[in-house]
Amino acid sequence: MLLVFLILSFLFSASSQEKVEEGVLYIYFREEKVGFEEFSWRPDELGYTLEASGQMTKPVPLEISQLVLHLDKSFIPWKYYFKGSVRGVGQEITSSLSEGDVKNIIRVSGRERESEAKIKRDAFLLPNAIFSPYLVLTKRFQCSLEESIELSAYIIPQLELPFTLETKEDYPCCLIMQLGGREIEIETDEEGNLRSIVIPSQRLRVAQNSSR
């Protein structure tokens, strides 16, 4: 009985570890390597948690000390936290979301302010100039999107923008996102792993080196 228990414990532990995805997104601007984001994606009792850290020098100097995004099992965000700097200015943002109501606490250069917003309940959170949250799109749709759909993105904590999402012709694992006049190509796989992001108009390319 003890041997059986130990085997089952080992299998359960290995299975739990397999559910955690870790990787590094390398960022290229005009084909020059300008930064990276280290991320982890893991299921939890409420849904999923995405964590990231990293930095970028161009086109916007950015440092991510900590980014945490909590989502429910339907990929709907309910909590967001960011600490870092943009163009050398320190920032800290804490956001709570419930049924489309957003409450933000923003700290910049020692000053604190609060803001509220009403967004679509299932809006994706896409912080400006941060790429790891695109993983939420690939995890949700993988290579299974059959027709163009209309969705919404909250460029937290600034504004909400509508966007369309469809697959590239003859390549269902490439999602084409039309957001604010920009086309964004997001490559995934059957498991929803984020492989690459290309934004031609901004000469930006992001590619992942992943491990488990």
Image (cartoon, rainbow, N blue to C red):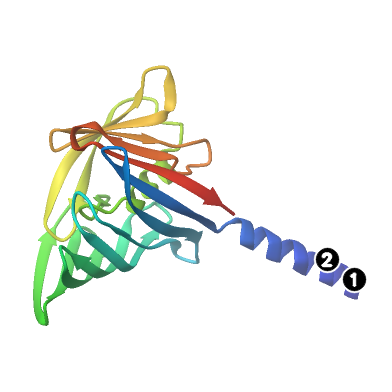
The secondary element bearing badge 1 is classed as helix
Residue at the outermost front position: 32
| Image location (x, y in percent) of residue 94 | 23, 72
Q: Left or right? Give the position of 126 relative to 173.
A: left
190 relative to 173 in the view: left or right: right
Which residue sits at x=38%, y=56%?
37
Tell whether 46 sits left or right of 76: right
Disc number placed over residue 29 in the picture, else none: none
Name which residue lies at 25% across and 52% down: 126
Can residue 1 be seen here? The reply is no
Q: x and y percent of residue 154 in the render?
A: 19, 52
The residue pinned by badge 1 equals 3
Instruction: Check disc 2 and report the residue beneath it.
Output: 7
Q: Residue at x 11, y 57 (%)?
A: 158
- Is 162 above or below relative to 47? above
* Amino acid found under the numbered disc labelled 2: Ile
Residue 197 on image: x %, y %: 34, 39
Q: Secondary structure at mark 2?
A: helix
Q: Are marks 1 and 2 in contact (CB under 8 Å)?
A: yes
Q: Amino acid at mark 1?
A: Leu
